[in-house]
Image (cartoon, rainbow, N blue to C red):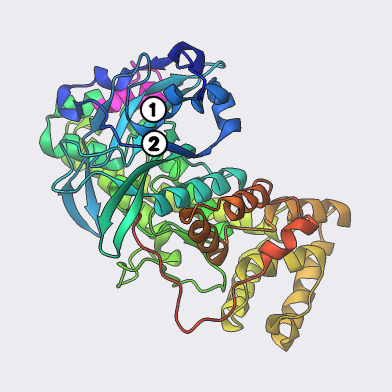
């Protein structure tokens, strides 16, 4: 018999600051119960960081909260309203299948949103059932935890609960699930678009003040340039985030403005995937027919989304619209510069370069061109360069690569650091493993059938991607050739 545990033993320490915003920004509502909740997976290390008792979360009472069958002590469940440019077209949206339970205050004073995804219909469901399937929720768990291990800012996954119910999708009936997502916040560019489109300047100001207090408390609340600084900080975080995506070959797949978090975290893992063979135009999403969110477009779309964000702030930047627009345009150029600085710095680290020289950009570009021409595996090419194991790949046999390699070695010889220091920099900059798409699919297929061993082993391998251990070698292998390109679908 399951041990009964009092809710207070779980460790909930919830605040509800988002509810202090005007009512327009959310709808309060109770969780939607499910019939037979069963814990599929629990992130025990994350639970401990949040100040939660993992054993208590596994109890009947804990699972009831994670399933949406009851609200946690101190919580104030609500669905957030926001808008979003969906592939370039603005739509009024909102949490159509998610509930913010509250904000957990950790033992060290940090604040994290606790959100249920797939928890049922809300005021913003627009005809949807508000539910989610087990496979996509486990997929978000795998990818978000892998991103965290790679050192990339991300929302995280606390738990997935199987609901015991089936949901209907185009592919048929699927087992349902609820994901518990942990985020610095769920403030999005689309939240500001909603405020600007459906509210007033005062409501945009209230949201901006809340964002400043929540994420940038170092900015003085009386500073006359605080809203400009808000944009600058958001842009700086996005420039770093997207550079980190590019450096590991991550493709988000659906960079709509409602999927861009003000905090600078990666959010909403739908049709995302990692590149195997390097090609800048790689697209995985089945619905991105025009390649809007292709790998090489991600930095550009980041700037486009920031332009939509700063448009909402124009009345707060300056009383004269022309002056406000001029300020915004200047700052958008800064974003582009910051992205390129971050990306080039990251690429230099991947090649073991500690300092910067004028020829570095061409050295990097020429390598990528060779990788594209010879259809080289993105991750494994850099691992091979790290350890000098230049074999078993068409790229390394090409005369053009031999010439490039000589240039690279000459460049390395001009810096003061030792070979050991170069090796350590490259080891810590080039992951041995990524969530290979075929490995993720195999784990999900087994888990949906009730076997979680494949998924658990994959998570263990991905937990320390820079270990370069013998156990990771198997998971570093690219997939076997297939008849068509790998496709992903929006998680439902």
Residue 455 vertical placement versus 97 (above, below): below
- The picture places residue 364, in percent across and down from the top left corner, at 63, 68
Gap in angstroms between the C-alphas marked 1 and 2: 7 Å
- The picture places residue 245, in percent across and down from the top left corner, at 51, 54
Residue 169 vertical placement versus 467 (above, below): below
Where is residue 93, by image quadrant?
top left
Element under disc 2: loop
Instruction: In the rendered structure, find residue 273 and report the number of the disc placed on it.
Output: none
Residue 420 vertical placement versus 193 (above, below): below
Closest to the observer: 107 or 210?
A: 107
Closest to the observer: 36 or 186?
A: 36
Closest to the observer: 321 or 273?
A: 273
- In the picture as drawn, the residue positioned furthest to the bottom comes out as 399
For disc 1, the neighbor class at 10 Å (few under 14, some 14 to 19, many from 20) is many
Residue 329 seen: no
Q: With 202 as the anchor, is 392 left or right in this view?
A: right
Mark 1–mark 2 contact, CB under 8 Å?
Answer: yes
Boundaries of the magenta span: 207-224
Closest to the observer: 21 or 77?
A: 77
Where is residue 277, by image quadrant?
bottom right
- The picture places residue 367, in percent across and down from the top left corner, at 64, 73
Determine which residue is flagged by label 2.
Answer: 37
Determine which residue is flagged by label 1.
Answer: 64
- The picture places residue 370, in percent across and down from the top left corner, at 62, 79
């Amino acid at each position: 018999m399951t041990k009964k545990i009092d809710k207070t033993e779980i460790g909930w320490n919830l605040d509800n600051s988002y509810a202090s915003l005007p009512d327009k920004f959310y709808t309060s509502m109770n969780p939607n119960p499910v019939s037979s909740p069963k814990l599929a997976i629990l992130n025990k290390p994350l639970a401990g960081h949040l100040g939660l008792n993992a054993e208590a979360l596994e109890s009947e009472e804990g699972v009831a909260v994670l399933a949406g069958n009851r609200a946690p002590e101190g919580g104030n469940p609500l669905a957030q309203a926001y808008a979003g440019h969906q592939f370039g077209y603005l739509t009024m949206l909102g949490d159509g299948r998610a509930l913010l339970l509250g904000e957990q205050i950790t033992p060290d004073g940090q604040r994290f949103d606790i959100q249920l995804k797939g928890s049922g219909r809300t005021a913003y469901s627009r005809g949807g059932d508000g539910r989610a399937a087990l496979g996509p929720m486990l997929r978000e768990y795998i990818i978000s935890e892998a991103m965290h291990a790679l050192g990339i800012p991300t929302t995280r996954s606390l738990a997935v609960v199987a609901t015991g119910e089936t949901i209907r999708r185009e592919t048929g009936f699927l087992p349902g699930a609820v994901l518990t997502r942990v985020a610095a916040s769920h403030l999005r560019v689309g939240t500001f678009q909603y405020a600007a489109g459906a509210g007033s300047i005062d409501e945009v100001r209230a949201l901006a003040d809340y964002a400043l207090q929540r994420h940038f408390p170092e900015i003085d609340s009386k500073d006359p340039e605080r809203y400009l600084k808000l944009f600058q900080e958001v842009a700086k975080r996005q420039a770093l985030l997207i550079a980190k995506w590019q450096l590991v070959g991550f493709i988000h797949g659906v960079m709509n403005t409602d999927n861009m978090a003000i905090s600078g975290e990666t959010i909403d893992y739908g049709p995302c995937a990692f590149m195997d063979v390097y090609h800048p135009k790689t697209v995985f999403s089945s619905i991105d027919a025009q390649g809007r969110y292709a790998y090489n477009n991600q930095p550009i779309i980041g700037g486009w989304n920031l332009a939509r964000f700063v448009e909402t702030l124009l009345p707060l930047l300056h009383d004269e619209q022309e002056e406000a627009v001029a300020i915004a345009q200047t700052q958008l150029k800064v974003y582009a510069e910051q992205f390129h600085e971050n990306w080039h710095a990251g690429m230099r680290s991947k090649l073991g370069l500690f300092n910067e020289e004028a020829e570095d950009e061409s050295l990097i570009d020429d390598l990528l061109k060779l990788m594209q021409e010879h259809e080289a595996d993105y991750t494994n090419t850099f691992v091979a360069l790290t350890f000098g194991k230049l074999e078993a790949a068409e790229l390394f046999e090409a005369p053009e690569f031999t010439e490039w390699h000589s240039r690279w070695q000459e460049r390395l010889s001009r810096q003061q650091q030792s070979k050991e220091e170069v090796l350590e920099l490259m080891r810590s900059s080039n992951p041995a493993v990524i969530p290979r798409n075929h490995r993720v699919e195999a784990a999900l297929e087994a888990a949906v059938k009730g076997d979680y061993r494949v998924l658990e082993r994959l998570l263990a391998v991905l937990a320390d991607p820079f270990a370069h251990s013998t156990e990771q070698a198997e998971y570093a292998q690219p997939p076997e050739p297939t008849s068509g390109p790998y496709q992903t679908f929006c998680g439902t």
